[in-house]
């Protein structure tokens, strides 16, 4: 390799990358603290960017449908107020949805907790009655059952002693919890303020990002980077709007069905199913299990029929509603959706389940584009990709022709040329 200026630069970058990687591997234990500090500093901006992306979907809807054609008498005024009014309407819509969800969940949750508190003494009596019947059926256990007594004063004194000994730890825990609450409130308000700035000036920020890309990158790489950003924005927006619409339809159908069949906790369970439907694949199972446990305390028979009802509803939703509402907006096969949900949930929890599906969809679209371009460059025919194409080619190939010989004669190999009379040089007469 010739050591010119370009190769020297690449070699220096490779050596620097190797040194940095070695240092990171040697100090990997201390990188967790550095990562947590950096995440804590950037958390308001990360939260604000996520909120801005979510609010951008309804804000863009209001801009397109309510402020698409300003009136002729005051077009400038409407054009100036178009973005602030759409942003305010988006904020009001999101807050209204949150208030409705909390209004439906909190009263039902309080009622459920009260029923559980009322059910505990009855459960204790049922257990005592069951032990008594067990003693009558099995007399050999009658001497053991009366001895099963709990000394509640002794338990209370032990609990007070434990609380007295752990008072310092309790104070420290309370202080850390209070500081965490204050930090969360600060992050929330700073993130909301940052999201408003992003939404108000998103066109200006887009122009600045493009200028930065073209200033420091080659034109071809800058075009590719901007194309990836536009593709990611389009896929994430379609995924978010489609999932929210599908979750709202599923929650509404569940509420109507539960009211028709007379299931308890219709409002709370329907809202829970609608919210957890935002999590692909596993959200529905979590919602069904939670709803069945709540109904089980009222009536086991109703809990069974509730599970049957929700399973039927999910089949209708998955085969009829979801393909029409969401369609191919994500463009990711079902197997890779499952892989993305499992990997994202294992790494980042519920947030990972939500984010990894559109992220993998972006990677899938980019990889499909690269593969298509390379196949077109190689001019590979489409028949090669059909299932069983290779077997069909092998079956359709004609068999190799075998040499045919006359009866009683050997194949002609290395026969000397003749003189025209059927005799070679050896058969000639002198």
Image (cartoon, rainbow, N blue to C red):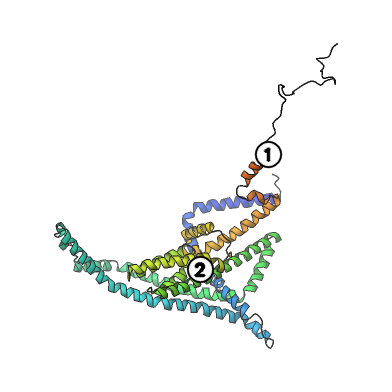
| Vertical side of 388 occupied by 105: above or below | below
Q: Disc count in the image? A: 2
Circle 1/circle 2 CB separation < 8 Å: no
- Which of label 1 and label 2 is nearer to you? 1
Q: Residue at x 60, y 77 (%)?
A: 200
Residue 69, how many percent across, how many down? 66, 81
- Give the CA separation, mark 1 to mark 2: 68 Å
Furthest-top residue in view? 430
Is there any visible trace of residue 103 in the rendered image? yes
Count residues near mark 2 (Cα–Cα under 10 Å), then give few for <14, some for 14-19, many for 20+. some
Is there any visible trace of residue 218 in the rendered image? no
Count residues near mark 1 (Cα–Cα under 10 Å), then give few for <14, some for 14-19, many for 20+. few
Tell me if 26 is positioned left or right of 211 in this view.
left
Q: Residue at x 53, y 62 (%)?
A: 357
As rendered, which of 399 and 190 lies closer to the eye?
A: 399
Tell me which label, 1 or 2, sits earlier in the chain.
2
The quarter of the image holding the N terminus is: top right
Tell me if 267 is positioned left or right of 91 in this view.
left
Q: Which mark is residue 42?
A: none
Q: Quadrant of residue 300?
A: bottom left
Q: At numbered mark 1, what does the secondary structure look like: helix, strand or loop?
A: loop
Residue 329, how many percent across, how many down? 58, 65
Q: At numbered mark 2, what does the secondary structure look like: helix, strand or loop?
A: helix
Q: Quadrant of residue 81?
A: bottom right
Furthest-bottom residue in view? 73
The quarter of the image holding the C terminus is: top right
Q: Which mark is residue 398?
A: 1
As rendered, which of 301 and 203 lies closer to the eye?
A: 301
Q: Residue at x 21, y 64 (%)?
A: 130
Tell me the residue that label 2 is attached to. 43
Residue 262, how many percent across, how many down? 38, 74
As rendered, which of 232 and 304 lies closer to the eye?
A: 304
């Amino acid at each position: 390799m010739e050591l010119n200026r370009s190769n020297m630069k690449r070699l220096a970058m490779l050596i620097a990358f190797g040194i940095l990687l070695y240092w990171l591997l040697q100090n990997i234990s201390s990188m967790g603290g550095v990562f947590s500090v950096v995440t804590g500093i950037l958390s308001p901006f990360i939260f604000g960017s996520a909120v801005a992306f979510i609010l951008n979907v309804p804000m863009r809807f209001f801009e397109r449908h309510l402020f698409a054609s300003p009136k002729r008498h005051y077009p400038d005024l409407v054009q100036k107020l178009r973005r602030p009014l759409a942003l305010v309407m988006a904020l009001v819509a999101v807050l209204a949805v949150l208030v409705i969800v909390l209004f439906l969940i909190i009263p039902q949750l309080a009622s459920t907790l009260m029923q559980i508190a009322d059910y505990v003494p009855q459960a204790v009596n049922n257990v005592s009655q069951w032990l008594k019947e067990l003693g009558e059926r099995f007399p050999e256990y009658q001497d053991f059952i009366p001895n099963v007594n709990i000394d509640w004063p002794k338990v209370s004194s032990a609990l007070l002693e434990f609380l007295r000994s752990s008072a310092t730890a309790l104070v420290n825990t309370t202080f850390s919890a209070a500081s965490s609450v204050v930090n969360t409130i600060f992050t929330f308000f700073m993130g909301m303020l940052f999201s408003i700035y992003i939404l108000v000036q998103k066109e200006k920020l887009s122009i600045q990002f493009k200028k930065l890309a073209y200033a420091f990158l080659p034109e071809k790489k800058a075009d590719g980077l901007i194309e990836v950003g536009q593709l990611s924005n389009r896929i994430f927006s379609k995924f978010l709007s489609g999932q929210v619409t599908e979750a709202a339809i599923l929650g509404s159908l569940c509420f109507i069905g539960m009211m028709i069949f007379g299931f308890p906790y219709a409002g709370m369970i329907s809202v829970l199913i609608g919210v957890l439907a935002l999590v692909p694949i596993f959200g529905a199972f979590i919602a069904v299990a939670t709803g069945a446990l709540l109904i089980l305390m009222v009536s086991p028979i109703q809990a069974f029929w509730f599970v049957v009802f929700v399973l039927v509803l999910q089949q209708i939703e998955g085969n009829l509603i979801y393909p029409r509402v969401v369609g191919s907006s994500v463009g990711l096969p079902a197997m890779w959706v499952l892989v993305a949900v499992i990997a994202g949930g294992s790494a980042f929890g519920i947030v990972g389940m939500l984010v990894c599906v559109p992220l993998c969809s972006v990677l899938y679209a980019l990889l499909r584009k690269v593969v298509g371009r390379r196949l077109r460059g190689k001019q590979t025919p489409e028949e090669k990709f059909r299932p069983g194409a290779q077997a069909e080619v092998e079956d359709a190939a004609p068999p190799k022709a075998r040499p045919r010989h006359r009866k009683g004669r050997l194949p002609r190999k290395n026969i000397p040329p003749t003189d025209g009379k059927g005799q070679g040089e050896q058969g000639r007469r002198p």
